[in-house]
Image (cartoon, rainbow, N blue to C red):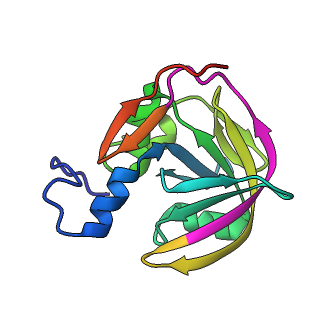
């Protein structure tokens, strides 16, 4: 883990990274594994594709523990984070300290797909395929089940910073 005090997109020389930072989007936490061996990663580069089957497509760090655990188990949990989860998002993103590990933050429920953050909207997914994509791994995961929770103050990420989205109309 490396923790940096500087802004990740400030004075960035890489135009692709600068462009990606301006896209923005919801912040999710992808998790996999069981109570003895589990991993997670904060992900904002993902999309949901409706269909039969519906899928979640994510762009992950190929060197992450999560990529390895997803490959081994073939299952995972994709949960959407709230503004109150921004410290947890940093811990799973490897940009903030997490004494005892990031799973010591938050309240967790163990599912057959992996650990799930209590009280969050989530999709239980099965990995359908993976492929190398640039410096990342593209994961296509089919949705087996969705749990919808209150979405009062979703967490969004844009240009290296978290933003509050406010309440939802639901």
Q: Is residue 133 above or below residue 43?
A: below
Residue at figure coordinates x 20%, y 51% from the top left: 4
* Residue 66 in the image, given as x and y percentages of width and height: 55, 61
Can you say which quadrant of the picture contains the C terminus? top right
Left or right, 78 with respect to 1, comes to right
| Picture mark count | 0
* Residue 46 in the image, given as x and y percentages of width and height: 56, 55
Inspect the magenta stretch and tell me whether residue 143 lies in it: yes
Q: Is residue 12 above or below residue 85?
A: below
Q: Residue furthest right?
A: 52
* Residue 1 in the image, given as x and y percentages of width and height: 32, 57
Q: Which residues are magenta?
A: 138-154
Residue at figure coordinates x 63%, y 30% from the top left: 120
| Res 94 seen here | no
Q: Is residue 85 above or below residue 13?
A: above
Closest to the observer: 36 or 43?
43
Inspect the magenta stretch and tell me whether residue 147 lies in it: yes
Residue at figure coordinates x 69%, y 26% from the top left: 149
Closest to the observer: 40 or 131?
131
Residue at figure coordinates x 32%, y 68% from the top left: 16
Left or right, 37 with respect to 92, comes to right
| Res 6 seen here | yes
* Residue 52 in the image, given as x and y percentages of width and height: 86, 58
Q: Is residue 114 above or below residue 88?
A: below
């Amino acid at each position: 883990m490396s923790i940096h005090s500087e802004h990740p997109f400030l004075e960035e020389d890489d135009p692709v990274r600068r462009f990606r930072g301006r896209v923005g989007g919801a912040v999710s936490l992808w998790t996999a594994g069981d109570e003895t061996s589990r991993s997670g990663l904060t992900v904002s580069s993902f999309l949901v594709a409706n269909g039969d089957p519906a899928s979640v497509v994510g762009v992950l760090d190929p060197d992450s523990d999560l990529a390895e655990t997803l490959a081994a188990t073939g299952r995972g949990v994709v949960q959407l984070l709230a503004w109150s989860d921004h410290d947890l998002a940093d811990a799973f993103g490897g940009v903030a300290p997490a004494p005892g590990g990031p799973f010591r933050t938050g309240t967790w429920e163990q599912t057959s797909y992996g650990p799930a953050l209590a009280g969050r909207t989530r999709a239980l997914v099965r990995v359908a395929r993976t492929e190398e994509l640039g410096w990342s791994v593209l994961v296509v995961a089919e949705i087996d089940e969705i749990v919808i929770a209150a979405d009062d103050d979703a967490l969004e990420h844009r240009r290296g910073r978290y933003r509050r989205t406010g309440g939802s109309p639901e």
